Amino acid sequence: MTSSAETAPPGGNGRSGRAPYDLPAVLDIAVAAFNDYGYDATSMGLLAERLGTSKSAVYYHVSSKEDLLRMALERALGELEAILEQPGAQAGAADERLTFVLRSAVRVLTDELPYVTLLLRLRGNTDLERDALARRRAFDNAVSALVEQARSDGTVRADVDARTTTRLLFGMINSIVEWYKPGGALSQDQLADDVITVAFDGIRVHPGD
Amino acid sequence: MTSSAETAPPGGNGRSGRAPYDLPAVLDIAVAAFNDYGYDATSMGLLAERLGTSKSAVYYHVSSKEDLLRMALERALGELEAILEQPGAQAGAADERLTFVLRSAVRVLTDELPYVTLLLRLRGNTDLERDALARRRAFDNAVSALVEQARSDGTVRADVDARTTTRLLFGMINSIVEWYKPGGALSQDQLADDVITVAFDGIRVHPGD
């Protein structure tokens, strides 16, 4: 995560023509505000206040609040879509590719927690939001196709519909943004392991385990 | 579900002293509006408009908007808490009680979809909301205690933390409110079976299955 302390250019003070924060820091604070108050209820004035600067300093970086939303959603979606381009998602048995994609998705969720939270809470009120939801659906569909392929291969159970399986998997994974505390006792890697274990093998101890 | 067509008392017209809808119908419409617009953005005037009646007709039933929220949350929480009082939740092996509680929770979610949706979206902005969240946590803790007991019994896997297990289970179950369409191709019973199958046995086909 980018923190404002690390990224504020030295000497920036919000009163000169120079912006006191760089764009990633402005984006972090905007996303936190959108998640706290809701996008509609967050004004550029409120963002400036949280940055301890003026509205004009915010406009140094972006031309509108929607610009900030666009950049934030691009970050979350770009990271998720990048998973599908990696070799682990493209080559190998479908169940192994599915494991790779789910594990990587947990990693993106925990690395980019506020950004993915924003994405998951979108309701589709504007063209920008609807475009983002379409990209999120495309990602879900790619995962659903892997589930279908693994079912055909006989490695994933066929007695549950592929779409239902995918939704239950994402239900489990997406819930992470509601309760996971980065830096806490549960590491990102342990969480990813736990998700894969529960998703693939369930919580039951089977005779012979 | 209660529909307004079935429950409007005959002869009610919104202009007499008599309310044109009965309380369950008013509550259904209020909950739908809270879910569509958000609780804060829903005024008593908007509710009256959606009911096709006057504000005074709405006040015939309730003294405030918060009354409607209280009744709606009571309905969702009451149904969830009632699960824990049933024999299937109280007697038997912990893993069987856990199965009973999760299956029953899926049933409550699908029977009371808008009411549980409202509960799950609460942010805890008022005392009423915080009380509801505390009751929801108490329900989650009861389920977590069953997971703990089943782990001790050796019927639920011990290599995933009980709290993480519970959260992943509820992540899967609570996501149902986001995508399940009552009356569609997937029946409530089939969905409950699918949740139990995926939660307990996972999506992988094991050698010998």
Image (tube, coloured by chain):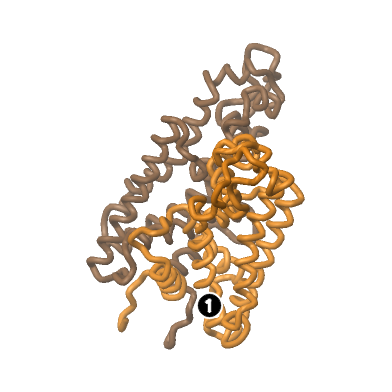
Chain colours: A brown, B orange
Q: Residues within 10 Å of mark 1 (few under 14, many from 20)?
A: some
- Please indicate, yes or no, whether residue A110 appears anywhere in the rendered image: yes
Direction top: furthest residue: A17
Q: Chain of mark 1?
A: B
- Please indicate, yes or no, whether residue A37 appears anywhere in the rendered image: no
Q: Quadrant of residue B87?
A: bottom right
> Measured along the vertical axis of the image, is residue A29 above or below residue B18?
above
Secondary structure at badge 1 equals helix
Percent x, y of residue A41 = 62, 31
Q: Quadrant of residue B98?
A: bottom right
Percent x, y of residue B90 = 63, 82
Direction left: furthest residue: A152
> Measured along the vertical axis of the image, is residue A48 above or below residue A150?
above
Q: Nearer the viewer, residue B186 or A62?
A: B186
Which image quadrant: the C terminus of chain A?
bottom left
> Measured along the vertical axis of the image, is residue B3 above or below residue A75?
below
Left or right of B27? Residue B190 is left
> Across the whole image, how many numbered discs are drawn on residues?
1
Amino acid type, callout 1: Phe
Q: Disc 1 marks which residue?
A: B100
Residue depicted at x 48% and y 54%? A106
Q: Nearer the viewer, residue B106 or B195?
A: B106
Residue depicted at x 52% and y 43%? A121
Residue depicted at x 27% and y 61%? A148
> Measured along the vertical axis of the image, is residue B91 above or below residue A131?
below
Q: Quadrant of residue B209?
A: bottom left
Percent x, y of residue B63 = 74, 46
Percent x, y of residue B12 = 58, 46
Which image quadrant: the N terminus of chain A?
top right
Residue depicted at x 68% and y 57%? B133
